[in-house]
Image (cartoon, rainbow, N blue to C red):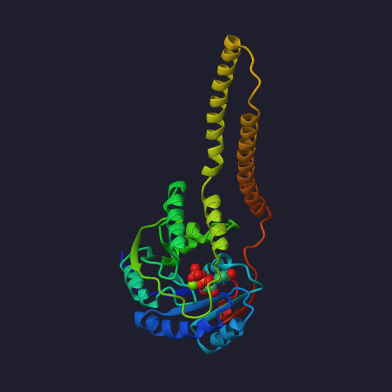
Amino acid sequence: MTRGAGLISIAVPCYNEQQSIQPFMDAITPVLESTGHDYEILFVDDGSADDTLPMLVALANASPHVRVLGLTRNFGKEAALTAALDFVSGAAVIPMDADLQDPVELIPQMVAKWEAGTDVVLARRQSRPDDSVTRRWAARFFYRFIARLSAFPIPENVGDFRLMDRAVVDCVRQLPEKTRYMKGILAWPGFQNEIIEFTRPLRRAGSSKWPLWKLFNHGLDGIFSFSTAPLRIWTYLGFILSLFSLTYLLWIVVKTLVFGVDVPGYASTLSIILFFNGIILIGLGILGEYLGRVFIEVKNRPVYLVGVKAGFGMGDENRG
Ligand code: UDP
Ligand code: MG
C-alpha cells in the first residue's frame, strides 16, 4: 500500500523552551516544506514559567501552520504529549522535542517510508554523547529489563521521536490510563514498523528537565504500568521460602529428638528476623506501587487541562 498527499503533524511539548522555539522553527520549516505535504506544527506549552507561551501564540497568529495549546500548569512531558496527540489532525504524526535533539533531517526519510506504506517509523538513537557512563548503562539495563517483563516489545533506545500513521494515533488515543508511560503507550498498538538509526545531538539551548532521580522514577512508572511481574515474584518467593522453612523445621525436630535441646542461636535468629522483615517491607512496597496506581486510575482525573488555544480554525474547536 502506498499513501498519497496527507497532512503531516508535528507534536511538540515545550516547557521553558523560549530559547529553543525560534531555532526549532527555523530548522524544521524548510524541511517540512521540502516534503511536499501540507503540515501543521502543534506546540503544547506545558505551563512554562518563561515567555514560551506568548512566543508560541505570536507564532500561531503569524503562521497558518502553527497551532498552540497552553496547559493550565506543568503537567509533565507525558501529559503534554498526550494533549498533542489528542489535538493533532494529521494523517501522519511525529512527536518531537523542542530542543532540536530529535534531528529534523530525519523527517523526509520518515515521511518517505510512511508514503511507501509503513505504519510506524521509529528513530533509534545510536549513541548518547551527552550522557555519562552510568546513565548509559542504566538506560541499557532498563531497556533489557523492561523488554523481558513487558508482554509486548517496547523498542530499545527509541524515544517519543517517531512517525505514526493516523490509524496508530487513533489506537493510542483509546488508552485511557492516567499513568502515562509514553514509550510503552506508543508501542502498545503494534503495527508494522521500520527503524531509522541516528546519533542524538547535544541540546542546543536551555537545559534538560530530567535529573537522574526523575529518570529513575520514570523507569519505575514504566515497569509498574506495563507489567505485573513484580507482583508475581512474591508468589514464587513465598513458595520457595515456605519450602525452605519446612525443611528446616523437619531438620530441627529430628535434631532435637536425636541430640536433645541446645539453646544458642540468638544472633542467627535476629538476623533472620531482620532479613525477612526487610523482604516483607519490599513486598508491601510493591503492593503499594500497584495500589497507588489503582488509586490514581480510579480517581479518573483528566491527564491535562487546556487553558489557551491558538491557531485552530473555527471547525477544529471541538476536537480532542
Ligand atoms: N518537557 C515538557 N514538560 C516537562 C518537561 C519537559 O513538555 O515537564 C518537554 C521539553 O520542553 C522538551 C521535551 O519535553 O521539548 C524533552 O525534554 P528534555 O529536553 O528536558 O528531555 P531530554 O532531552 O533531556 O530527555
Ligand atoms: Mg532534550
Choose between 183 and 190: the one closer to the eye.
183
Residue at image coords 47%, 64%: 169
Residue 89, can we see it? no
Q: Is residue 53 left or right of 168 when viewed as pictured?
A: right
- Which quadrant holds the N terminus? bottom left
Residue extending farthest to the bottom is 62
Residue 209 in the image, given as x and y percentages of width and height: 56, 70
Q: Toward which corner of the image does residue 266 lie, by quadrant?
A: top right
State the residue at coordinates (46%, 57%). 138
Identify the residue at image location x=34%, y=63%: 195
Observer able to see residue 41: yes
Q: Percent x, y for residue 230?
A: 54, 43
Which residue occupies the foreground of this view, 222 or 107? 222
Residue 81 appears in which quarter of the rendering? bottom right
Task: Tell me: residue 263, above or below residue 204.
Answer: above
Q: Position of residue 281 (x, y in %)?
A: 64, 42
